[in-house]
């Protein structure tokens, strides 16, 4: 296992973070909100590419938003989706990349954001972006990401742990390659939880990320290669 922990001043930190984005992230520009589809109720299943927006706070007794298509942008516009303690707030499973989720509040789901198997053909990028998101009061885990290959980015995200005794992970990264976590905060509840748990991954970069109030490790790294933490 190769783990590097760096302490850099502001100038060098800026240079490092620019390089990380260039190396690990292929810029993807969201579609225009004017050509978008409004999500008016939950659960909502997305089966075709496009831009999907919230125009109000929504609630669900099951899943929130289910993404079954590549080339999808979800713009929360600061609105929230709220569950009843089960299922997933946003579920993205087995799609061919280019999924952007931004500016949304996700509350009271078992898992706030569940990402599994975002892939493309060989030598292409997965293009997963989670940005400006708040995940609160999950009953099991805030954000779960598995099998995301190249150009996964989690930026300006805040995860606030739930009070359920089953709450275990703020952010869980599993079997990812080339994944970057930037400017992120995880606040646990000290009830048997980890802050950020990274397992069986390669080339994970964590920059300017704050973790507090967890029962176990703030950042736990297991069976990883080339993980870099910049403080």
Image (cartoon, rainbow, N blue to C red):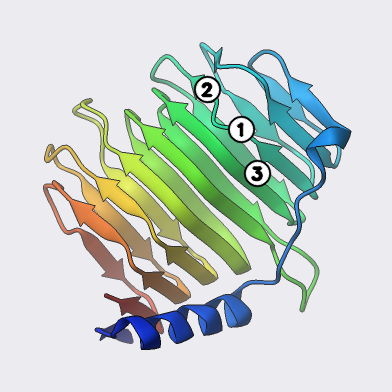
Relative depth, front residue between 81 and 46: 81
Real-space Cα separation, disc 2 to disc 3, in angstroms: 19 Å
Circle 1 residue: 76
Q: Are marks 1 and 3 in contact (CB under 8 Å)?
A: no
Camera-nearest label, 2 or 1: 1
**Quick one: label 2 or label 3, which is nearer the N terminus?**
2
**Does dot 3 land on a helix, a strand or a loop?**
strand
Q: Which is more foreground, mark 1 or mark 3?
A: 1
Horizontal and vertical percent position of residue 230? 32, 78
Residue situated in front as seen by the camera: 161 or 78:
78
Q: Residue at x 52, y 55 (%)?
A: 146
Question: Residue furthest toward the front?
Answer: 11
Q: Nearer the viewer, mark 2 or mark 3?
A: 2
**Helix or strand or loop: what does disc 2 sit on?**
strand
Which residue is identified by label 2? Answer: 81
Give the residue displayed 74% in from the left and 61% down from the top: 28
**What residue sits right under mark 3 in the picture?**
93
């Amino acid at each position: 296992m190769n783990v590097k922990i760096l302490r850099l001043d502001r100038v060098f930190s800026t240079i490092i973070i620019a390089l990380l984005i260039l190396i690990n992230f292929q810029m993807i520009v969201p579609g225009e909100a004017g050509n978008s589809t409004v999500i008016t109720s939950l659960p909502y299943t997305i089966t075709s590419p496009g831009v999907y927006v919230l125009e109000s706070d929504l609630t669900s007794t099951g899943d929130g938003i289910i993404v079954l298509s590549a080339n999808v942008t979800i713009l929360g516009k600061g609105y929230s989706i709220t569950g009843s303690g089960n299922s997933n707030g946003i579920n993205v499973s087995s799609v061919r990349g280019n999924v952007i989720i931004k500016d949304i509040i996700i509350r009271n789901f078992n898992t706030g954001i569940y990402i599994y198997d975002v892939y493309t053909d060989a030598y292409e990028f997965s293009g997963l972006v989670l940005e400006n998101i708040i995940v609160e009061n999950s009953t099991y885990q805030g954000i779960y990401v598995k099998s995301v290959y190249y150009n996964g980015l989690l930026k300006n995200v805040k995860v606030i742990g739930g009070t359920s005794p089953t709450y275990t992970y703020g952010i869980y990264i599993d079997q990812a390659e080339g994944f970057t976590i930037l400017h992120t905060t995880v606040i646990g509840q000290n009830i048997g939880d980890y802050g950020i748990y990274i397992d069986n991954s390669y080339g994970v970069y964590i920059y300017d990320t704050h973790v507090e109030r967890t029962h176990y490790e703030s950042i736990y790294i297991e069976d990883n290669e080339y993980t870099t933490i910049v403080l």
